[in-house]
Amino acid sequence: MSASELERLGIDPAAVEAALDTDLTFPARWYSDPAIYDFELDSIFTRSWVIAGPLDRLANPGDHIVCRAAHVPILVTRARDGELHGFVNVCRHRAYPVATEDGCRQLLQCAYHAWTYELDGSLNRAPRAEAEPGFDKADFSLVPVAVDTWGPLVWVNPDPNAPPLREAYPGFEPMAQEHGMDFSGYVYHSRSSYDVPANWKVWVENASECYHCPTIHRESFADAWNVDHGTYQYVNQDRLLGQFTVPNPKAREFGNATGEFRYIFVWPSSFIVMDEHVAFPGIITPTGPETCVSHSHFYAREGLDSEFVAGWVEMYDRTLREDADAVRVQQPGLRSRLVPNGRLMPASESAISRFHRMVWESFKESLGVASGKPG
């Protein structure tokens, strides 16, 4: 990419490399600049795997779910032959969504002008097409995206030629297996959404460290789980960030934790949390330079008392709401840009350092930058 693109984005590769090498954060501007945000959408989210939703919502032919990979609206269907298909959820006529909610239909019809599609994405009918010379239905199938599954989840990637999930993240399944994260014995419980008034990277960074847990989550997560330095473990592996710990022996309100707390972040914006009581996969969706939304699908272990499960889900819900409150206060400081860089604490924030490297590696690939210099 030309040097003019680097100039347009205001990126000095050597300065970025030097900052990362000395444990400084990204420039504060990167957390509010619309140009950086738009660049991230194209350089990161158009070619990455994200969680689409629970696989059990696609159990039968005709079942379909709607989701987003950042700015890309996506529709996933279960076709009559049992195959899963994924598409950009945009009618080939005038960009209206083909479906606006999860459901089950044997044909998919755009509500704007009634263009109708088969479950495999091919155009079935366009009203009045017979009056248009040269109109060929085969030219206007829905635009495909890649689809894969893991455990109880369906995943999507806007790049239809993307390598399969397990190939893209070869360490993911082994890490999940090592920590018993196969969801055996868990059933779907509920869904929660959190509107986050901060840049998506701020939310990922917050979720990537428990340095803040003794203060922000003193009466929620840190009451249930041991967040002491040296006990709380981080495993940074390629494009995976793992966190693991044991119950807090001094728990007050939440004294029922057993086994191990497990968290795996899958680049760029998906995560899976699990303990012996509940589990929740989640997806962080950028919605603007200074906003994002986080969706969580809660599962509970079969046989547990419903009131106990509700309390345990509430503990995690409280934790996530506390995080949202924290980044709400943090974002204006980044927007001010008067403190150009923060200073990371690698002994406690190694996962953020790795996350910054992942972002920067994607930037460099798109910008044609190598060894800190324009390519």
Image (tube, rainbow, N blue to C red):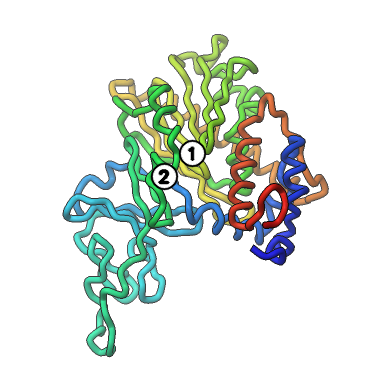
Residue 235 horizontal/vertical position (percent):
55, 26
The answer to which of marks 1 and 2 sits earlier in the sequence is 2
- Position of residue 307 relative to residue 327, above or below, is above
- Image disc number at residue 51: 2
Mark 1 residue type: Val
Which sits in the foreground, 216 or 259? 259
Relative side of 95 to 207, left or right: left
Q: Residues within 10 Å of mark 1 (few under 14, many from 20)?
A: many
- Position of residue 172 relative to residue 6, above or below, is above
Residue at the image position 40 percent from the left and 38 percent from the top: 297
> Label 2 near label 1: C-beta < 8 Å?
yes
Residue 294 horizontal/vertical position (percent):
50, 44
Query: Which quarter of the figure has residue 204?
Result: top right
Residue 323 horizontal/vertical position (percent):
60, 36
Q: Residue furthest top?
A: 249
Q: Nearer the viewer, mark 1 or mark 2?
A: 1
Residue 111 horizontal/vertical position (percent):
32, 70
Which sits in the foreground, 139 or 28? 139
Residue at the image position 17 percent from the left and 53 percent from the top: 81
Q: Which residue is mark 1?
A: 266
Relative side of 367 to 316, left or right: right
